[in-house]
Image (cartoon, rainbow, N blue to C red):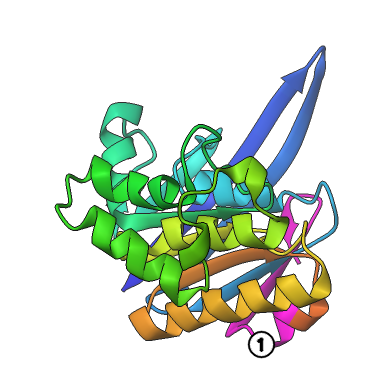
Amino acid sequence: MPVVEAQNITKTYTIADREIHVLDNVSLSVAEGEFLVVEGSSGSGKTTLLSLLSGLDKPSSGRVLLAETDITDTSEDDLAPLRNATMGFVFQSFHLVPSLTALENVMFPAEIKRDPRAHDKAADLLKRVGMQGRRTNYPHQLSGGEMQRVAMCRAVINNPKIIFADEPTGNLDSENGKAVLDLLLEFQKERRTTLVLVTHSAEIAKIADRMIVLKDGRIV
């Protein structure tokens, strides 16, 4: 059964009198446990595709299904808890809450679910990625590689069915990038999580189960 599916989705923005088609009639199905890479040049529609698949944005036309349930017209109030329970996100810019410590950032999604083990789970995850000594540090006190490890722990704490990763190594040097990617794939295989990863890296694309290439908003 597909974990997530796009059916003929189009995303159009109107700027002044111009219509810009960011995505044009894209259909895509991602299976349980699959590692899918989305590749393409800047402006090809990669990040928009992730936003639509995760329900962070709505398509101009077409449908998005999560575990065969149509979420296209689902309200944000209903989508937010669904995303928190079933999805994890890793962004190029980390998106950590600056006023929370590393531990508190990782705990946050589990606390929203009212998980009584949120603290212990977060502490265990940070220990696993070598961050146990940085648990009380705030994001501005962490390096880029450390922030991305925190973001990755936050993404997996609720055992999501699917992780969306948008250029997760884009702001990291090659050594930190490899370490973060290795950990992400370790979690993905261990928990049989579906992983949809946007990247410019041909090296990452080589190790994926499948790759699609976007050009001018279409799968080529």
Instruction: Name the residue at 60% across, 44% down.
Output: 139
**Mark 1: amino acid:** Ile
Residue in front for this viewpoint, 196 or 104: 104
Which image quadrant is residue 143 in?
Answer: bottom right
Instruction: Name the residue at 62% across, 83% down.
Output: 208
Relative to 113, is 189 on the left or the right?
right
Q: Is residue 205 magenta?
A: yes
> Dot 1, crowdedness within 10 Å: few (<14), some or many (≥20)?
few
The secondary element bearing badge 1 is classed as loop
The x and y percentages for residue 49 are 61, 50
The x and y percentages for residue 148 are 61, 59
The x and y percentages for residue 45 are 72, 49
Magenta residues, as a range?
Answer: 204-220
Relative to 87, is 202 on the left or the right?
right
Disc 1 designates what residue? Answer: 207
Q: Is residue 133 magenta?
A: no
Instruction: Name the residue at 53% across, 48% down.
Output: 137
Relative to 123, is 14 on the left or the right?
right
